[in-house]
Amino acid sequence: MMQRSVVLVHGLWYGAVSLRLLARRLRAHGFQTHCFSYPTVRRSIGESARQLHRFARGLRADSLDFVGHSLGGLVILRMLDEYRGLPEGRVLLLGSPVSGSAVARRLSDWPVARGLIGRSGRILTAGFAHAPAGRETGVIAGTRGMGLGRAIERLERPHDGTVSVAETRLAGATDHLQLPVSHTGLVLSNEVAEQTATFLTVGRFRTV
């Protein structure tokens, strides 16, 4: 049986270490995992997308799925929109603000805070309009409203403490699932890992 390869992409202010637990759980399901690391504040979305494409192309996999947490999901969408020729596979977004982030917009309004989101600010405030063509795309949104985002902006309920469920709605997505986890919990929860493995395998989430 062909082993599926998965590229995991972390979010703003996180690093590849934040994905280790999720990667380990996916490996237990038979996936070969690869964590992509990038500077989330200093590098533009276009530069990050280009580096992700180079990273993915270098894996020489027969099948290639992508899992992105928060900003990482936007990097994946931008990369797949700009580049072609990668192996077929599915895409899963974990709490990615594809409709734009209210928290990021608030930070952008404060001159003293703009540096916190840096060159990722534009894509975080604008979001990304549509799912990638030719790839089944799933979205998991958290509903446990615990996180620093609540101290920055009043979020529409339900939310995960940083991103609202409404902000995760992606046109053309294959499936959308809400789970009672926080924004950080999206990469720590065993249930999220199980649902991720299910979607990457069959293209749908398991009914909860």
Image (cartoon, rainbow, N blue to C red):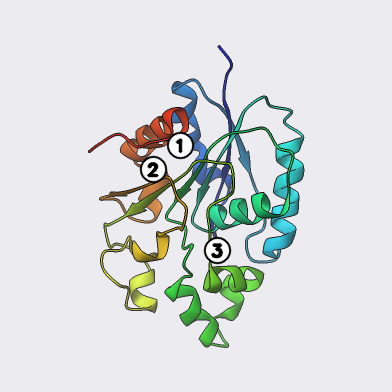
- Disc 3/disc 2 C-alpha distance (Å): 25 Å
- Please tell me which of labels 2 and 1 falls first in the chain: 1
Q: Identify whether 28 is placed above or below 101.
A: above
Residue 41, x across and y down, in percent = 64, 66
Residue 44, image x, y percentages: 70, 65
Callout 1 environment at 10 Å: few (<14), some (14 to 19), or many (20+)? many
Relative to 48, is 205 on the left or the right?
left
Q: Which residue is drawn at 65% across and 47% down?
A: 37
Asked whether disc 2 touches disc 1, contact meaning CB atoms under 8 Å apart, the reply is: yes
**Considering the image in quadrants, where does the C terminus appear?**
top left
Look at the numbered disc 3 and give the secondary structure of its residue: loop
Q: Which residue is drawn at 30% across and 34% down?
A: 206
Q: Which of 14 and 204 is in front in this view?
A: 204
Q: Name the residue under label 3.
A: 128
Q: Can residue 164 be seen in this view?
A: no
Decide: few, some or many residues near mark 2? Use Cα within 10 Å; few <14, some 14-19, many ≥20.
some
Is residue 129 visible to us here? Answer: yes
Sequence-first tag of 3 and 2: 3
Q: Residue furthest left?
A: 208
Residue 91 place in picture, x, y as percent: 52, 42
Structural distance between the alpha carbons of marks 2 and 1: 7 Å
| Amino acid beneath label 3 | Phe
Q: Give, as a three-letter code, the residue at label 2.
A: Leu
